[in-house]
Image (tube, rainbow, N blue to C red):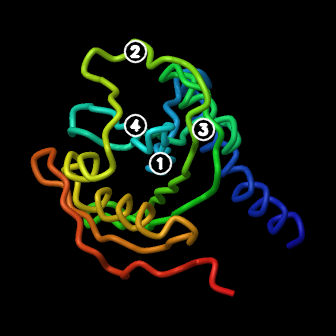
Amino acid sequence: MKSIVAFILTLFCGMPFAFAQDSAKVAPKPRNEVQPGDNHTIQRLIIFNQQQEILLEKGRNGWMTPALRSNKKQTLKQGLDSLAKAIGLVVEVKRLAGIFTYKWTDLDDVSYRTHYTAKYISGNIGQAAKPHQKYQWFPIKEALDSIRFDALKAETKQIITYPKTLWGGAFLCTANDGKFSCVMEEAFYPLDKK
């Protein structure tokens, strides 16, 4: 009886090994071919110059505050420094000014938008790496009027209007035919309330 039980256990325990051997015949992709996942997290810089103008970046979606999609292995500081450097500027990051949640109707993931205020120190706006990008300084009112994406406009206005508060808020967003629309799900609230 013991030998029959041992035989059955050997048979069943060996089956996963056999299946594993069959599945191992398909070569996995080399590590450098695996595409990293997009966490949809974005860091934004609201850069002020000495004239109290704000730097905006014009891309495919119109004028926005300069942004970095945070998918690389780097610290927050490294990311913000690399963003400013890519523009051709040296900035002094003043403070974290906003953390906003974006939920998407067609994605299970949630993403975050962090906004930092920064002071222009030196440098000249360089030639953008992508041909559809352009950078320009705007007076505050004109900058806000130039941002077409309603959620970003609201976030930027809240941060500029109340510059000493760290703001939170949440948006529910949809994407249709490459166009985004968001509705506020949680009204702006201070995160640094004492």
Quadrant position of residue 11: bottom right
Q: Provide residue 42's location: percent of width, then percent of height.
A: 47, 48
Q: Provide residue 172's location: percent of width, then percent of height.
A: 29, 70
Residue at numbered disc 1: 42
Mark 4 Cα within 10 Å, few/some/many (few <14, many 20+)? many
Residue 8, above or below 52:
below
Q: Provide residue 156's location: percent of width, then percent of height.
A: 38, 58
**First in sequence: mark 2 or mark 4?**
4
Q: Secondary structure at mark 3?
A: helix
Kind of residue sitting beneath label 1: Ile
Looking at the image, the residue that sits furthest to the front is: 51
Kind of residue sitting beneath label 2: Ala
Whole-angstrom CA distance, mark 4 to mark 1, is 17 Å
Residue at numbered disc 2: 129
Q: What label does residue 120 carry, if any?
A: none
Q: Nearer the viewer, residue 9 or 184?
A: 184
Q: What label does residue 55 carry, if any?
A: 4
Res. 54 in view: yes
Q: Is residue 15 left or right of residue 142?
A: right
